[in-house]
Structures are given as structure tokens and as C-alpha cells.
């Protein structure tokens, strides 16, 4: 048992805590990425839904609706 002195147990505990921290950070990163993409998709749908509701209530005309819808759904990201 020469390798299991005080430093041996301390290093083993330190390694286990380090691995647990690494796993926790990995899980947190995956969760953060998943929620970020899900929230971004909802925000875009939400803006389009609001626009459709305003159009249905008659607050904006056909031209304004088409212009704003085109800007919301543009793929190139320019405004």
C-alpha cells in the first residue's frame, strides 16, 4: 500500500471532484445551447404571429404586412 499515502487519497479525491465538475459543465453547456436555439426559434415565430394578428385586426394594410413579413423571414439577415 505504498501508493495510498495521504497524498494518494488527496489526489484521488481531487481527481474525482475534477471529473464531476467536468461532467457538470458539459451537461450545463449542452442545456444552454439547446435552450438558446429553442428560444431563438420562438422569438421569430412570436414576431410573425404578432404581425399576423395586427393584420387580422386591420391595424396594418396589405403593403405594410408584406413588407414586414419579408423582413422577418429574410434569410440574409439584412434589415
Image (cartoon, rainbow, N blue to C red):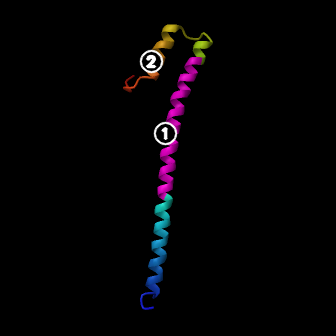
* Badge 1 or badge 2: first in the primary sequence: 1
Q: Going by the image, does 69 lie left or right of 52?
A: left
Q: Is residue 2 above or below residue 33?
A: below
Which of the 4 image quadrants contains residue 71? top left
Q: Position of residue 65 (x, y in %)?
A: 51, 13
Q: Is residue 34 magenta?
A: yes
Q: Which residues are magenta?
A: 25-52
- Vertical arrangement, residue 5 with respect to residue 76, above or below: below
Task: Give the main secondary structure, helix, strand or loop, of the magenta stretch.
Answer: helix
Q: Which mark is residue 70?
A: 2
Q: Residue at x 53, y 23 (%)?
A: 48
Residue 40: percent from left, percent from top: 50, 35
Name which residue lies at 44% across and 18% down. 70
Outermost front residue:
1
> If the image is split into quadrants, where does the C terminus sit?
top left
Q: Which residue is mark 1?
A: 37
What is the secondary structure assignment of the residue under circle 1? helix
Amino acid at each position: 500500500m505504498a501508493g495510498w499515502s495521504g497524498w494518494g487519497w488527496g489526489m484521488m479525491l481531487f481527481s474525482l471532484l475534477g471529473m464531476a465538475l467536468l461532467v457538470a459543465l458539459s451537461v450545463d453547456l449542452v442545456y444552454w445551447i439547446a435552450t438558446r436555439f429553442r428560444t431563438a426559434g420562438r422569438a421569430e415565430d412570436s414576431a410573425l404571429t404578432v404581425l399576423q394578428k395586427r393584420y387580422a385586426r386591420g391595424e396594418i394594410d396589405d403593403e405594410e404586412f408584406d413588407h414586414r413579413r419579408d423582413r422577418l423571414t429574410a434569410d440574409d439577415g439584412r434589415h
